[in-house]
Amino acid sequence: MVAMGGHALAVITVAMAAAAILSFPHATAAPNYTRDFDVTWGSDNVAILSNGRGLRIRLDNFTAAGIASKNYYLFGSFSMYMKLIRGDSAGTVTAYYFASSDGDDRDEIDFEFLGNLTGEPYILQTNMYWNGTGGREQRNYLWFDPTKAYHNYSVLWNPQQIIIAVDGVPIRIVKNNEDIGVPYLLRRPMKIYASIWDGSIWATRGGAIKINWGKSPFDAYLAKYNYDVCGIGKNSCVRKKWWNQPQFQTLDANEQSQLQFANTYKVYDYCEDRQRYPVMPIECTRNNL
Ligand SMILES: *[C@@H]1O[C@H](CO)[C@@H](O)[C@H](O)[C@H]1NC(C)=O
Ligand SMILES: *[C@@H]1O[C@H](CO)[C@@H](O)[C@H](O)[C@H]1NC(C)=O
Ligand SMILES: *[C@@H]1O[C@H](CO)[C@@H](O)[C@H](O)[C@H]1NC(C)=O
Ligand SMILES: *[C@@H]1O[C@H](CO)[C@@H](O)[C@H](O)[C@H]1NC(C)=O
Ligand SMILES: *[C@@H]1O[C@H](CO)[C@@H](O)[C@H](O)[C@H]1NC(C)=O
């Protein structure tokens, strides 16, 4: 990793906190990217900020970049503040995801931030893979400019549901529907990843707009994160498994109305794509609360 000096603190102090609707307990250890993450891709383009409290990942015409958590986790909550590429980010993908492996049989929960031309809106695409099968995309615009300030992107994962939230507002719920034959992420621990790469072939307006290398380098910033998780093996939980309590197994009325608000920013849902899925996937009747 490349250490960065002066720029660092300024980046971190821009961090803003919106009024969170969901609020989860979290581990007390201060975040430290050096301690908790490894560089997995393009080490020249990963810079540690503020002595480990922040990170910059860069895409340029030499390399993409990425990091992965040192540990695997099974259930819990994880949130990370991110600030996306400023200006022309068309063709880029900034990803933040949870995955069991890189293999063909991987389990995954994905956030993919699809860049755009200057002034045009980013799309946040979320997706899920079970044993290598994905195709469960949802796409949302955001109700703020994600390049101007840090925002909080979080996941609560328990045996009943996965809540994907932005600044505490749930934008997507994935229920455990194993009772009707739909696979759920129950058995395999996952690492936490972040990366930045060239997605020109599909990311912006379906691939119509390519990356403009003249605007390189493309920088995204990661800042404070919270986690409260179980790792693998005995005594691996940070704390008691609070996420199994009843209030985390369903959404309350307030959270449901927040989800409805977020849904007004939704621009694509695989559950509504009849061309792609002439027969509606069975879980769709339940996931859309
Ligand atoms: C983060 O961890 C690294 C190595 O584990 C350590 O050198 C550094 O001082 C830590 N940063 C903070 C802010 O504690
Ligand atoms: C990368 O871009 C820079 C600036 O546009 C250019 O000078 C350089 O030759 C490019 N390098 C490669 C490997 O394309
Ligand atoms: C996952 O997929 C592989 C084939 O890619 C298959 O052999 C295996 O049985 C599957 N596992 C489960 C739990 O379905
Ligand atoms: C991010 O949002 C989650 C869900 O609302 C919350 O529990 C967590 O504390 C927030 N993270 C930070 C670093 O504030
Ligand atoms: C980019 O901007 C265009 C025009 O506003 C919009 O249709 C599109 O959804 C935006 N986002 C992406 C990732 O293509």
Image: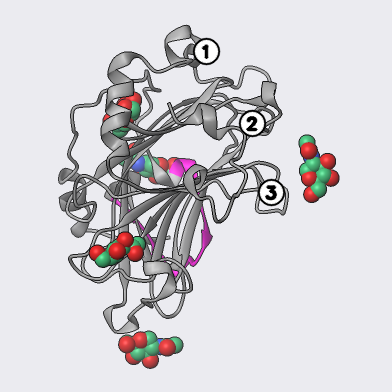
Residue type at the position of mark 3: Gly
* Category of crowding for the residue at label 2, using alpha-carbon neighbours closer than 10 angstroms: few (below 14), some (14–19), many (at least 20): many
Quadrant for the C terminus, please. Answer: top left
Residue 164 versus residue 7: which sits nearer the camera?
164
Secondary structure under tag 2 reads loop
Secondary structure under tag 3 reads loop
* Residue at the (19%, 59%) spot, across then down: 7
* Residue at the (45%, 71%) spot, across then down: 198
Q: Is residue 158 left or right of residue 232?
A: left
Secondary structure under tag 1 reads helix
Q: For mark 2, what is the residue?
A: 184
Tell me the tag on residue 132: 3
* Category of crowding for the residue at label 3, using alpha-carbon neighbours closer than 10 angstroms: few (below 14), some (14–19), many (at least 20): some
When the figure is inspected, residue 210 is found, relative to residue 172, above or below; the finding is below
| Residue 130 screen position, x and y as percent | 66, 41
| Residue 126 screen position, x and y as percent | 45, 46
* Category of crowding for the residue at label 1, using alpha-carbon neighbours closer than 10 angstroms: few (below 14), some (14–19), many (at least 20): some
Which is more foreground, mark 3 or mark 1?
3
Q: Would residue 276 be seen by someone viewing this image from the given angle?
A: yes
Label 2 beta carbon less than 8 Å to ligand 3? no
The verdict on residue 39 being magenta is: yes
Residue type at the position of mark 1: Asn
Label 3 beta carbon less than 8 Å to ligand 3? yes
The verdict on residue 219 being magenta is: no
Residue type at the position of mark 2: Tyr
CA separation in Å, label 3 and label 1: 26 Å
Q: Would residue 99 be seen by someone viewing this image from the given angle?
A: no
CA separation in Å, label 2 and label 1: 16 Å
Quadrant for the N terminus, please. Answer: bottom left
